[in-house]
Image (tube, helix red, strand yellow):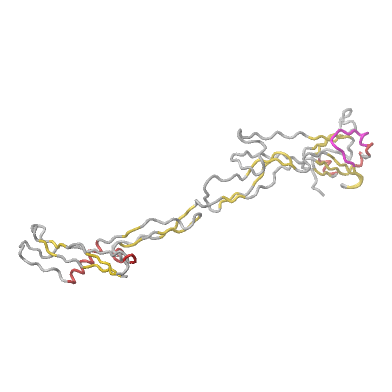
Amino acid sequence: CTTRCEEPKCEFDCSKAGSMGCKTVCPEPVCQWLCKRPKDCPKPVCSMQCEQAPDCVKDKNLVVPLPSGMDRVGRAKKARKEQSKWLVGPWSVCSTSCGYGVRTRGVKCNSGRDKDCESIFHKPYDKEACEENKGCEWTVGSWGSCSNRCGPGNKTREVECEHHKCPGDKPEATAYCEGHGETCEACEVTIYGGGLFEGWEHTFKAGSYSSSELEYEGVKCDDISSLEVVGARCQMTAFQYGDFNQQHQGWKATFREGKYDVEAMEANGARNNDISSFKLVKLPKPDPPARHHDLHPHSAPGHDSPGNPIHPSVRHSSAAAVSAV
């Protein structure tokens, strides 16, 4: 499908002769469709630059010839270039919704030929780098175990952004928790003799045991080779004398959850493998940490609450405790 524009017929108009001289008057070009189906044809674009006639005279009766064909073509080209300009469209959206991408725009010369505009101005860029973050999302991992096996502690998780900028507030990476291990509520001590965590053994629940009670249970007080305290809040206080040092002043040693050999017992204050009496007690639960007024102190695991306080671990194990054998 093609289009054709009829060339307008230009005439001189000297009716207003004066300092301005005669002018070439050109009517608007007439454009016609040359196709069977107009809906398939592009709209024709026709233009004609009218110029002031050369060699104008004031005599209205004098016929001034039109410029030659070559002159008209040359002047039309010059006029077209002088009126040429770049038409720039809006930028497109970024090619990605998260990260770095490219955006584009339409750039064309109004004359229909880029070389007309390029001879006057450099062509504007039709593409450039862009950055977008509205589609970025936070990647959140699973909560880890509580830092305190029994009682108040902290739990953590991985929180990362797939790009360096993610919309919205960063999800909490640390939260309050309470540990509930298998032995949190337990409290007992097993005393061994004749070998390291072997030989004869006797297990005791919470309570007070004098030398006579230990002897009745079969404990050889001067032959204790190791002991194990079970229970996060369990505490054993051993005494040198069988009456809990009430009548005599002697050493006193304290043991928390863990395993202790002879060296570890001595490091805690027990001397000569001799424990004549002891008290085993279950300590009370520590108070929960102060919380923000609108947060419950016992948040469920995995609860996301901005501003959750971080509670330091309250678990204290003896430096002299021996690793499990």
Residue plotted at (82% across, 38% down): 187
How far from the left and from the top, in percent, is residue 101?
47, 58
Residue placed most toward the observer, 245 or 60: 60
How far from the left and from the top, in percent, is residue 31?
24, 65
User: Is residue 67 rendered to the left or right of residue 294?
Assistant: left
User: Is residue 80 rendered to the left or right of residue 93?
Assistant: left
Q: Eyeballing the image, is 207 above or below 29?
A: above
The answer to whether residue 206 is magenta is: yes
Residue plotted at (7% across, 67% down): 63
Residue plotted at (6% across, 61% down): 58
How far from the left and from the top, in percent, is residue 61?
5, 64
Q: Eyeballing the image, is 115 above or below 168?
A: below
User: Is residue 16 rendered to the left or right of residue 217?
Assistant: left
Q: Residue furthest front?
A: 36
Q: Quadrant of residue 110?
A: bottom left
The answer to whether residue 302 is magenta is: no
User: Is residue 134 rendered to the left or right of residue 255?
Assistant: left
Please give the range of residues in magenta: 202-214
Residue placed most toward the observer, 228 or 65: 65
Q: Quadrant of residue 183?
A: top right
How far from the left and from the top, in percent, is residue 304?
61, 43
Q: Eyeballing the image, is 275 above or below 41?
A: above
